Amino acid sequence: MAASQELPNGGFELLVERPPQSLLRRFFVTLQHLLGLLFGGGVAYVRDRSAHGQGGTISVILVRFILFPAWPFLNKQIVRQPFPVQVRLRLEAMGPTYIKLGQILSLRQDVLPKSITDELQNLLDRLPVVTFARFQELVEADLGRPLAECFASVFPTPLGSASLAQTHRAVLWTGEDVVLKVIKPAVRETIQRDVTLMRLAGRIFQFFLARYQPQRIINEFCTYTLSEIDLRFEADNAETFLANFKDDPEVRFPRIYREFSGRDVLCMEFFAGVKPSVAEAAKLTAAERSHILRLGLSSIVQMIFHDGFFHADLHPGNMIIFSDLRVGFIDLGMVGRLDESTRKGMLYYFYSLVMGDPENAARILTTIAVPGRKSDLNGLRRELTDLNRRWTSASKFHQFSIAQLVLQSINVAGRYWVYYPEEIILMTKALVTIEGMVNLLEPNLELTALAREPIQQIIRTELNPANIWHKTLINAPEFMDILQNAPMILAHLLQQIDRQTLIPLPDPVPGLKETVLAGFFLVAVALLVVAGIPWPIWLVLMIFALGLALRGLS
């Protein structure tokens, strides 16, 4: 682990490097903190029971007996804290992997009590930094060139420092202001070893906590974290966002300078703006606040419900408001991806909510869930329906917001042995964050009213005949293959039906099967014509239908 000392410039602590720990050493360090957390939980249990006058019960006496030999070895500064604080302090002491894990778990009230998830939101975000000389060495090692050859100047004071990387402002020789993001030394090796240990722990926990799918949660977290320590993925993400929003000049993502970027270094455009805060909101007029809120919300709605590719690490520090009232997003290392079926399901779910249809919203969210071995989908749907109805009856934002509704809907799944993919959790985090920004800039404004217009716009886009036509053209070759093979498939199906019939019955109406199938195909042809499908496709289908009809009449 790295030690630290005060750094007078910039207000950051200085990271003192030490060689990365071996896998075995990392295992024992992790085990030490986990045992410390276990015994610390025992201390908190005894303290809580004693405070309520139950210090003489058998359970408390037994816990005291177990704690007695371990007491001299416990960190007294940590174990004397409330248990949620102990969890946070242990995660911070265990290093970058567990800080990232804590940030994800802060949303998992289906896994952890609310007191712990609330405390995990206080995890450190201003972590120790390496010296500027060491920062320069890291940049030059990854780019394979001297720093002065790439940049006219680099500011020695860090802009920020998180668990994985630190950032500095710089200026290119072309005069463009940029930000340099560099992975801290030994972070990659530490995370790779932690991932190995965590995946092993996930397999073990799966035997005892299968209801909460710990193995799947840990594997998903490990995949996300490993992608964050290769900054080439963040560069790819930024360019994807730029492409998705190329037609919206009011929403900005930083340009990536690939010639000055690599696995450990990312060079991106510097955004000169302010971050959302109460102080900044006070400087804006009502019209300006409304404009910013519309932009911020519509961009998140487009990311999630239209593109299926969204910023998964949203918080006010990763959002920028420019002087011309445009909105920007930074720190794009962690993204969520929704496959087409999940994206459409969440779109229809959110649309049902904002349109006031609690029953349909509950039905859709239940179909998206991943059932377990003992799952109770009917019970889940009933509870989601009741929850949605309570939400529609709430009259004020602070009583029951839509983001809180979505979060609670996801959190109740564990009680019914149902699991939601990590992408849904990350999507919920994005909604909670944007709702927090809405409440920050315009208190008591309901997200539902603000979200109705962009959601309806996406629904109209989905149903646009031009888009349907475009998707039809894309799928036309596959559809033609299906049509060409349809006679063989139908013949095989009819043969199977005949073979499974033990006592063949006489055909009451000769040619009935062929006539019914012909009618079916003719109805399909009519629908295709109305939808504007190219004539070669429905013509083939019509010929096939007429052939069946003639066979039925013969």
Image (tube, rainbow, N blue to C red):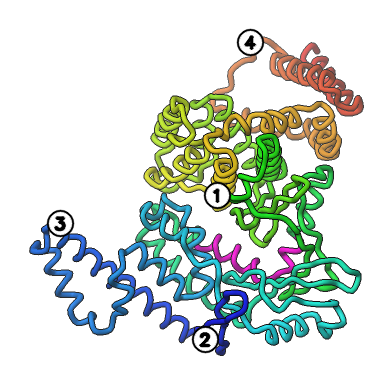
Which of labels 1 and 4 is toward the front?
Answer: 1
**Image mark for residue 52:** 3
The answer to which of marks 1 and 3 sits earlier in the sequence is 3
- Specify start and end residues of the magenta stretch as a single range: 218-236
Disc 4 target residue: 508
Q: Where is residue 341 in the image (x, y as percent from the top left)?
A: 65, 40
The answer to which of marks 2 and 4 sits earlier in the sequence is 2
Residue at image location 45% in from the left, 35% down from the top = 400
C-alpha gap between disc 4 and disc 3: 82 Å
Which of labels 4 and 3 is toward the front?
Answer: 3
The answer to which of marks 1 and 4 sits earlier in the sequence is 1
C-alpha gap between disc 1 and disc 3: 36 Å
Is residue 456 rendered to the left or right of residue 128?
right
Q: Position of residue 12 (x, y in %)?
A: 57, 76
Is residue 131 rendered to the left or right of residue 502?
right
> Along the line of sight, which residue is nearer the eye, 207 or 119?
119
Residue at disc 2, secondary structure = loop
Residue at image location 40% in from the left, 29% down from the top = 386
Q: In which quarter of the image is residue 58?
A: bottom left
Disc 1 target residue: 429
Q: Is 230 part of what is drawn in magenta? A: yes
> Along the line of sight, which residue is nearer the eye, 132 or 110?
132
Disc 2 target residue: 21
C-alpha gap between disc 1 and disc 2: 33 Å
Tell me if residue 211 comes above or below residue 154 in the rendering: above
Residue at image location 81% in from the left, 82% down from the top = 147
The answer to which of marks 1 and 2 sits earlier in the sequence is 2
Q: Which amino acid does label 1 sit on?
A: Lys
Q: Residues within 10 Å of mark 4 (few under 14, many from 20)?
A: few
The answer to which of marks 3 and 2 sits earlier in the sequence is 2
Can residue 305 be seen by looking at this rendering?
A: no
